[in-house]
Amino acid sequence: MKQLIITIALFCIGNGLIAQSGDDLFFSEYLEGTSQNKALEIFNPTPDTINLDNYEIWRFGNGATNPSDQLPIQLIDGPNIIPPYSTIIITNGQIEPNVYGHVDTTLYEMADMTGPGVYPSPMYFNGDDAIVLVKDGSTPVDLIGVIGQDPGEGWCDEDSLNYQAGDYYWLSWTSQNRLVRKPSVTQGITVNPDSFDPSVQWDSIGWDTTNIDNNWSHLGSHNYDFYPGKVVFNVIHAGTPVYGAKISIYNQELVTDSLGMDSLSINEGAYPFQITKLGYEAYIDTLNMTSNDTTINIVLNEAPLYNVTFTVQNTMGQPVFGAQVSLEGEMAITDSSGLATIEASDGSWNFEVFADEYQKYSGEIIVDGAPLDSTVILQPVMYELVAHISYGAQNVENAYLTIGGETTNTDADGVANVMLPNGEYLLEIGKDDHQTFYDSITIQGENEFIELELLQYHDLAFSVIFNENPISEASVVLDSLELNTDSSGMAVFEVINGNYNYTITSESLDPSEGSVTISYNDTVVVVSMTDIKDPGLNGFQVHPNPTRSDIIINSDYKGIVQFYNMTGKLIDTKQIYGSLQYSFEYPGVYIVRMKTDAINVVRRIIVK
C-alpha cells in the first residue's frame, strides 16, 4: 500500500518545479562517483530542529514506478535530529571491497549515517535512478530525477535530448559527478516532473580522478542565500574565557569553546536565554535579534560551592569501586565504599557515571544552597545470548530456553535470545516431545551464539504376532527399557534418533532378537514369533513347531508315535526309540501322541 501511495502522490499532484520559502528538508549535495563512492547531503533550511524518525530515502531504479528499495534515516551517533541550517551526510556503507568496489574510507568516516553495506539499498544508486526524500511514509519532500523514466547513462542539461543522456555518458550530470544545490534553492522538488534538467537547481562540480579526496570537499556544509542573522555569545569571568558554559536559547543548547564562544543563526525576534556553568551564578537575559549579525559579551560571577556526594552501588546494593563520576566536566573516582564527592554551585546539573562492566548512568541533580547526597544504582552491561534450535532440516518453534532466572521461547525461525551480564549460567532448552538439553555457559564481555539440534522423541512401536495373531503380555526389552505388549500385541517406546537392540520373549515361544535404527521418523517393527518351545517333559520332545513340513521327535523311551488330524482321525503310526523324522503332506493342525509302558504324552503341531 505504501508503494501505491507514493506513486500516486508524485504523479498526480502536478508537474513542474516548486521553489518557495524553505519549510522542509532537501538534498543539498549528490555524489555518484567511482567504485561505491556514493553520498547524499541533506540540508535543513528551517530555524527549527527537525526529528528524522519519519524520513526515508527511496530509490526508483532504471525507470521503475514503484520503489526499488527504501532506507529509513537513522543517524549513527546522538539523537536522530538535524539542527537548523545544518546538514547530514549519508554514504554507501560497503567498506569491504568486492568485485563492485567499495566506499572510500575517508568518505565513509565523514558519514552521519551509512547504508547497510549490502545490496539492495538506496545508497547503491546509479546515475539512471530517481532518488526521493520521503516524509511520513508517503509524502515526497525532494526528488532527484524523474520517476518512471530511464535516462540511459543519466540526466543531463541537453534540451534536444529531453535532458536524458542515453548512451552519451559524457553528457550525464547524475553519473560520475558531484552536484551541489544552488544557494538560491529554498525547497525540494515535491512533484514528479515531465523532465529533469539538473542545471536548473544544481551546479555540476565534476569528478576528480587525480585526487579522490577532493571529491568530498563540499560535504558537511551548504551555501544558502537565506540564512538568518548570526549571534555570537562571548562568555568570560575576570577577563578569562569560560569554557563549557551552556547557553539555552530557542529550544537549543550551545556550549562555549576554549575561547568562551559559541554562535547561532536565528531570525529576527526576542529570545529569552540562560547561561549556566558549574561554579558560577546563572545568567538570564533576552536577546533582541535584528537582521544584522551581533556579538553579546557576558560576564559570569562566581557562586558558592557545596559538596555533592555520590554513592555508587550495583543492583545488589554493593559499593562500586573505581567508578568515574562526571558532573558538568568535573571528575571524581569512587573509593572502596563507592563514594565520590564533587563541589557544585546552585542549579540543575547533569552528571554521568561510568564503570567497567556497567552501563553508563545519566542523571540530574538540583543543588539549592546546601550539600547534597545522591545514590546511583548501576546496571550491568548486558550481552545477547542467541540460540538457534533445529531438528534435522527444520527450525524448532516454541522451544523454551531458561537461563539466569529468565525463560523465553523460540520464534518461527527457531531463534530465542536473552540479555545477560557477565557470569556463569546453567542453561536448559526443551520442548514437549523433545529431549531436554542441559549445559553451562559463560558470558564474558561479548555476545554468544548457540546452534543446537534438539532431538525429538519418536514412537518406536513393536507389533508382536504369532501365526498372524497378536500376542499380549510378551516382554519387549529395548536396551535398558522394558514393556509388555497390550491386547493388540503392541508395545510403544518413545526414543530419540539412534541404534537400538531388542529382545522379545513370550511364554512357550522362542525369543526374537534384532536391532532397529531411528532417524527422524516414527517406526513400527513387526515381529513374528516362531518355534513353539517344547520343554521335553517326560523324555519326549518335538521340534520345530510350527513347521513347514518336517518335524523331529526325540524320545528317551521305546514306543509308538501316533499322528491324528484335527478331526481325531488316526493318519499314521510309527515306531520310535531315540529319534524319528516325520513329514506332513498338508498344512494344518495335528496331534502327535507318544505311547510307551511308562508315558502317554500329547503334542499339538502346526504345519504352515
Image (tube, helix red, strand yellow):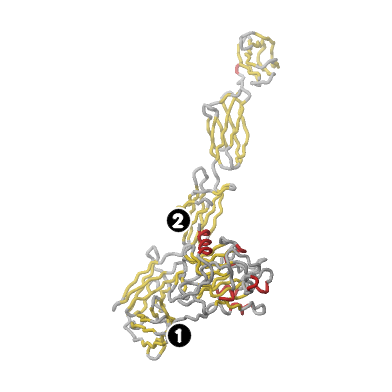
Whether residue 247 is visible here, answered yes or no, is: yes
Mark 1 vs mark 2: in front: 1
Q: Which residue is situated farthest in the bottom direction here?
A: 239
Residue lying at 59% horizontally and 42% vertically, measured from the top left: 520
- Rendered image quadrant of residue 169: bottom right
**Residue 554, labelled with which disc?**
none
Q: Residue furthest left?
A: 369
From this view, report whether residue 27 is shown above or below residue 456: below
In the foreground, 100 or 525? 100
How many marks on residues? 2
Q: In front here: 145 or 525? A: 145
Return the residue nearer the eye: 120 or 420: 120
Which mark is drawn over residue 258? 1
Give the distance between the C-alpha atoms of the residues marked 1 and 2, in whole angstroms: 49 Å
User: Judging from the image, what secondary structure is the residue with disc 1 in?
Assistant: loop
- Give, as a three-letter code, the residue at label 2: Gly
Q: Residue 419 placed where, x, y %?
A: 47, 59
Asked whether residue 599 is in view, the answer is: no
| Among the two numbered marks 1 and 2 on one chain, the one whose residue lies closer to the N terminus | 1
- Left or right position of 155 against 428: right
Type of residue at label 1? Ser
Which mark, residue 404? 2
